[in-house]
């Protein structure tokens, strides 16, 4: 979701989670609507899909909080240190499995190997992200496997993917249980955080 080709930060989660009434596309929707849903999800699209980058809008016009989006915005602000992080522009969102569920379950475990093998390298290669942030254990294990990254580090780079030098960072998922501190400063050393920040300057 967002401008994948231009956003300098890409957050990778496990798979999309659907809130009540969330209008996720289906195979039967027109292609231009599906494309608009993803590319312009956070603004300037055929319709208003979201509000303020942290709330989703249902078919009845009501908006609802999305804690995951709020967390990724906080993380982007922490990483950029500019006081300005715009969903879909400053950062884009994707997943290692593209099929949505209401919650993480066995279907995700069954799909992760096949879906990531088909799409993950292509998504990262197409992105303009200099920093790829993996959120949660599913995304972390999958990204380390697909891109052959070492297990023992929380920040790794630069890695050439799609002709662009990128840095990978690994954090807990914002909704992890038991609760974990999902922040850069809470999980990375000052040196590791500086590496990510420096490549965005």
Image (cartoon, helix red, strand yellow):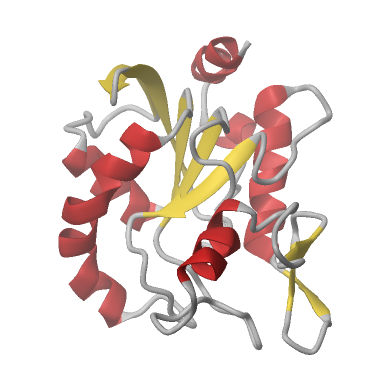
Please give left or right for residue 134 compared with residue 122 in the image. Answer: right
- 187 over 97 or under it: above or below: above
Q: Residue at x 50, y 76 (%)?
A: 25
Q: Nearer the viewer, residue 122 or 30?
A: 30
Please give left or right for residue 176 compared with residue 23 in the image. Answer: left
Q: Nearer the viewer, residue 143 or 5?
A: 5
Q: Residue at x 21, y 29 (%)?
A: 150
Q: Residue at x 66, y 87 (%)?
A: 21
Q: Nearer the viewer, residue 179 or 112?
A: 112
Q: Position of residue 26 (x, y in %)?
A: 44, 81
- 119 over 16 or under it: above or below: above
Q: Position of residue 43 (x, y in %)?
A: 74, 53
User: Which quadrant of the view contains residue 58?
Assistant: bottom right
Q: Is residue 177 visible?
A: no
Q: Position of residue 49 (x, y in %)?
A: 71, 67
Q: Residue at x 64, y 58 (%)?
A: 41
- 189 over 43 or under it: above or below: above
Q: Position of residue 4 (x, y in %)?
A: 50, 40
How many marks the image carries: the answer is 0
Image quadrant containing the C terminus: top right
Please give left or right for residue 3 compared with residue 64 in the image. Answer: left
- 19 over 158 or under it: above or below: below
Q: Is residue 59 visible?
A: yes
């Amino acid at each position: 979701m967002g401008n994948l080709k231009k956003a300098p930060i890409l957050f990778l989660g496990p798979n999309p989670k659907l809130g009540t009434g969330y209008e996720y596309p289906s195979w039967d929707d027109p292609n231009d609507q599906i494309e608009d849903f993803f590319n312009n999800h956070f603004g300037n699209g055929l319709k208003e899909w979201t509000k303020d980058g942290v709330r989703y809008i249902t078919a009845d016009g009501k908006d609802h909080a999305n804690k995951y989006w709020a967390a990724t915005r906080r993380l982007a602000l922490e990483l950029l240190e500019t006081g300005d992080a715009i969903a879909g522009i400053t950062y884009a969102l994707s997943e290692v499995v593209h099929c949505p569920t209401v919650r993480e379950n066995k279907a995700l475990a069954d799909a992760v190997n096949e879906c990531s093998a088909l799409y993950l390298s292509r998504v990262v290669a197409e992105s303009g992200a200099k920093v790829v942030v993996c959120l949660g254990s599913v995304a972390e294990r999958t990204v380390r496997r697909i891109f052959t990254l070492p297990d023992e580090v929380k920040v790794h780079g630069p890695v050439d993917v799609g002709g662009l030098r990128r840095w990978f960072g690994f954090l807990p998922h914002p909704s992890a249980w038991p609760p974990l501190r999902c922040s850069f400063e809470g999980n990375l050393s000052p040196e590791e955080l500086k590496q990510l920040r420096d490549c965005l300057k």
